Image: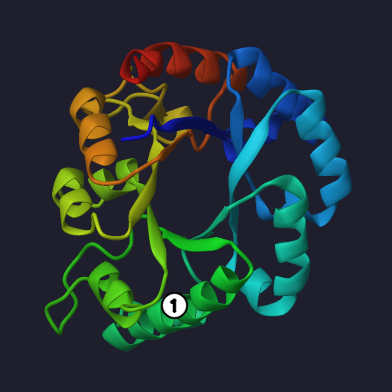
Amino acid sequence: MSKPILSLQLFSMRSLGSLDEQLSVAARAGFGHVELLEGHLLKPCELKGLLSRHGLSSPTAHLGLSALRADRSRIVDACHQCGIGQLFVQGVSAEHMPETTDGWRRAGAELGSLAEKLKINGITLGYHNKMAGFRALPAGRCGFEVLFNAARGSPLVWQADIAWISRAGVDPAEWLKRYASVLVSAHVKDQAPEGENEEEDGWSDVGAGVLLWPSLWREAVKYGARTLVVEHDNPSHPLEFATRSLTYLRRFLQ
């Protein structure tokens, strides 16, 4: 089994200003890999130069479904220039994601079709979950299940946001096991104890919260995650968050 890659989601660094400064902080914190956002792909030559300047690589990126619909060719070119091999759609557009079985089915079918097209260009497409999709619909299945059933047979994969699954009130380990056949990546973030860190939307540094990361990390890697992406949705001090979280997580890379 190959050693997993530990990366930093640049959404956590957005308050720092320019992309140059965000990448500088990621490198200073000790990361060698980052996960990019859709807007970063607009100037691929500049992006490639900044990544090189800071000694970073970008194996993955997040983007919206609307961008793939409208501008897939440009996105593919940017990925090829910058070494991005996996793209993850974080949620899907509102018209595809009402809490109905049909809405989730349409989302899965479209994502599966796009995954087929991107595979031709050497790029893997995946779905990144939020909290939605883990409660039973009137038909009995959860939206997440419906989405991946609709995409069955396609190369669509999954990036598990484990903390959002936990916030949905279900067991992340159970879902990692059930969907091991499509799991390729996971987001690593932590939930603060109830009533704490309200100014940070209830999140915490990884290892300082209530999620049992020693076992969750083990389960994620066991069931297929090869890129583990550190994230905090609203850190007050991004550099300190990144540094402390990486220090905690390095024990799992031994």
Vertical comparison of 78 with 9: above or below: below
User: Would residue 143 appear left or right of 244 to someone viewing this image?
Assistant: left
- Image-quadrant location for residue 144: bottom left
* Residue indicated by mark 1: 112
Q: Position of residue 65 (x, y in %)?
A: 58, 71
Q: Position of residue 185 (x, y in %)?
A: 40, 46
- Image-quadrant location for residue 98: bottom left
In which quadrant will I find the C terminus? top left
Q: Position of residue 189 (x, y in %)?
A: 39, 33
Give neighbour class at mark 1: few <14, some 14-19, many 20+ (Cα, 10 Å).
many
Q: The residue tagged with tag 1: helix, strand or loop?
A: helix
Vertical comparison of 252 with 39: above or below: above
Vertical comparison of 223 with 31: above or below: below
Choose between 217 and 3: the one closer to the eye.
3
In which quadrant will I find the N terminus? top left
Which residue lies at the image location 46% right of the left edge and 32% below the top edge?
Answer: 5
